[in-house]
Structure formats: C-alpha cells, structure tokens
Image (cartoon, helix red, strand yellow):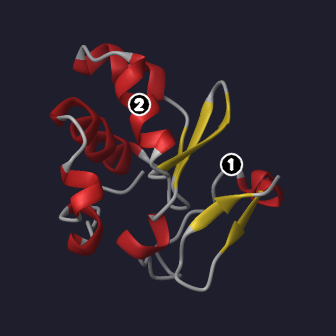
C-alpha cells in the first residue's frame, strides 16, 4: 500500500461533502488512506471500529455516491481516479481487479456501479 495519497479539493470542499457529518468525512479520509491503488477498500469494518463510528455514517457516504458498496466486504471510492493519479512504475494492480466488471468509469473519472 502506498504511503502517500492525494485529495481533490473539488470533492472534499464541495457542499455535498461538507454537509456530511464529521464522522462520515473522517471515514472517507481514512478510507482513501487505506485504499489500494485502484480505490478498493477491504477493511472498512475495521476502520469503523477503529474510529468508533456507526455504520449509518458510512451509509451516508454510500447514499451520496462518495463510495460504492460492492459487497459486504468490499468498497470502492467513487472519485478515486479524480483524487489519485498513480504513475505506472509505482502502480500495484489490485487483487480485486476482477471486480471492475461491476463498475464503469465515466468520462469525468468517477466509478459508477453497473446495475
């Protein structure tokens, strides 16, 4: 996992993000720091326990489209490609790359879940 991550201010300073509870904002920032190079987070339950926050705060992020719940154990950060551009010589392919068949990358760089 990388030691550094970037944050796009147009996302984290947006009215939609700033209107979230501070707990939801904190979860999001910790998920970015713990995501793999493709934006997948597989230890989100541990993060909730570590931060002592409720699942309802994560649900707010899901409802507003900041993260995608792929299954009970895996999340994907919707704006990952907006936040982070990783050089190919530093990129480590996700062990969840097979899950890309469940999402689509929009022209603006956002992941969306396919129905």
On screen, residue 110 above or below 103: below
Left or right side of 20 for 103: right
| Residue under the image location 60 percent in, 65 percent down | 111
SS for dot 2: helix
Q: Earlier in the sequence, mark 2 or mark 1?
A: 2
Q: Which residue is mark 2?
A: 58
Q: In this view of the protein, which residue sits in the foreground, 6 or 15?
A: 15
Among the 4 quarters of the image, the one containing residue 49? top left
Q: Position of residue 46 (x, y in %)?
A: 41, 19
SS for dot 1: loop
The residue most toward the bottom is 107
Q: In this view of the protein, which residue sits in the foreground, 76 or 112?
A: 112
Q: Position of residue 14 (x, y in %)?
A: 23, 65
On screen, residue 20 above or below 109: above
| Residue under the image location 52 percent in, 70 percent down | 91
Left or right side of 48 for 35: right
| Residue under the image location 18 percent in, 52 percent down | 18
Q: Which residue is mark 1?
A: 95
Q: Position of residue 101 (x, y in %)?
A: 83, 59
Is any part of residue 84 visible from this angle?
Answer: no
Q: Position of residue 113 (x, y in %)?
A: 70, 55
Q: Alpha carbon of mark 2 to alpha carbon of mark 1: how far?
A: 23 Å
Mark 2 Cα-neighbour bin, 10 Å: few <14, some 14–19, many ≥20: many
Q: In this view of the protein, which residue sits in the foreground, 4 or 53?
A: 53
């Amino acid at each position: 996992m990388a030691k550094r991550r970037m944050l796009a201010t147009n996302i984290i300073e947006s009215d939609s993000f700033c209107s979230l509870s501070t707990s939801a904002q904190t979860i999001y920032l910790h998920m970015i720091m713990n995501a793999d190079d493709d934006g997948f987070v597989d230890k989100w339950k541990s993060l909730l326990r570590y931060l002592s926050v409720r699942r309802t705060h994560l649900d707010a992020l899901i409802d507003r489209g900041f993260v995608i719940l792929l299954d009970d154990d895996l999340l994907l950060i919707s704006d990952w490609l907006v936040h982070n551009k990783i050089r190919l010589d530093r990129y480590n392919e996700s062990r969840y790359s097979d899950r890309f068949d469940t999402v689509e990358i929009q022209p603006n760089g956002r992941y969306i879940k396919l129905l």
